[in-house]
Image (tube, rainbow, N blue to C red):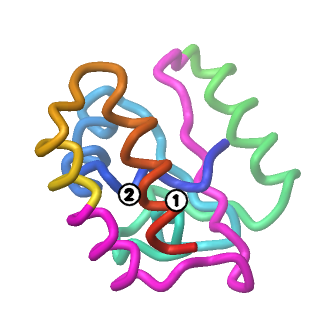
Amino acid sequence: VCAGAKSILDLPKTLEYLETQGVCVAGYRTDDFPAFFTPHSGLPVSCRLDGPGEAAALVAAQRQLGVSSGIVLGVPVPDDLAAEAAVVEEATRKALAECEAQGVKGNEVTPFLLKRINELTG
């Protein structure tokens, strides 16, 4: 269960990779995969689940079928807490440039980017 993939990732490639691994990408009360800071990415989910009963039924069906590839349940950030997509995209571009300029590498990249995007977007 997540608010979508991190906005710093290439979301179409992320969803494509999940699909190749047989992972069901479901949206909780949405047809649009959430984009972490924003409720919409413009990318479709594999299926929509409109309540906890539907989510539980999906998990049960997957277990009954013996499917072990997992499920991603994307739950959009509430609209009143969501950032504006264009603002996040600009902050991400700036944070990536700063990351490269400062020579941040390896497992320090994601925490740096997320912290910097939060700072830039307030």
Q: Nearer the viewer, residue 20 or 122?
A: 122
Q: Nearer the viewer, residue 47 or 65?
A: 47
Depicted 51 relative to depicted 66: above or below: below
Magenta span contains residue 114: no
In terms of image quadrants, where is residue 51? bottom right
Q: Which mark is residue 7?
A: 2
- Magenta span: 67-94
Give the image location of residue 42, x and y in percent. 35, 77
Residue under the point 34% across and 85% down: 86
Residue wearing tag 1 = 36
Depicted 64 relative to depicted 110: above or below: above
26 lies left or right of 105 = right
Q: Residues within 10 Å of mark 1 (few under 14, many from 20)?
A: many
The amino acid at mark 1 is Phe
Residue under the point 55% across and 53% down: 26
21 lies left or right of 81 = left
Give the image location of residue 55, x and y in percent. 75, 47
The amino acid at mark 2 is Ser
Residue under the point 19% across and 48% down: 13
Q: Are marks 2 and 1 in contact (CB under 8 Å)?
A: yes
Q: Secondary structure at mark 1?
A: loop
The Cα–Cα distance between marks 2 and 1, rounded to whole angstroms, is: 6 Å
Residue under the point 59% across and 21% down: 65
57 lies left or right of 9 = right
Q: Secondary structure at mark 2?
A: loop
Magenta span contains residue 81: yes
Give the image location of residue 10, x and y in percent. 22, 52
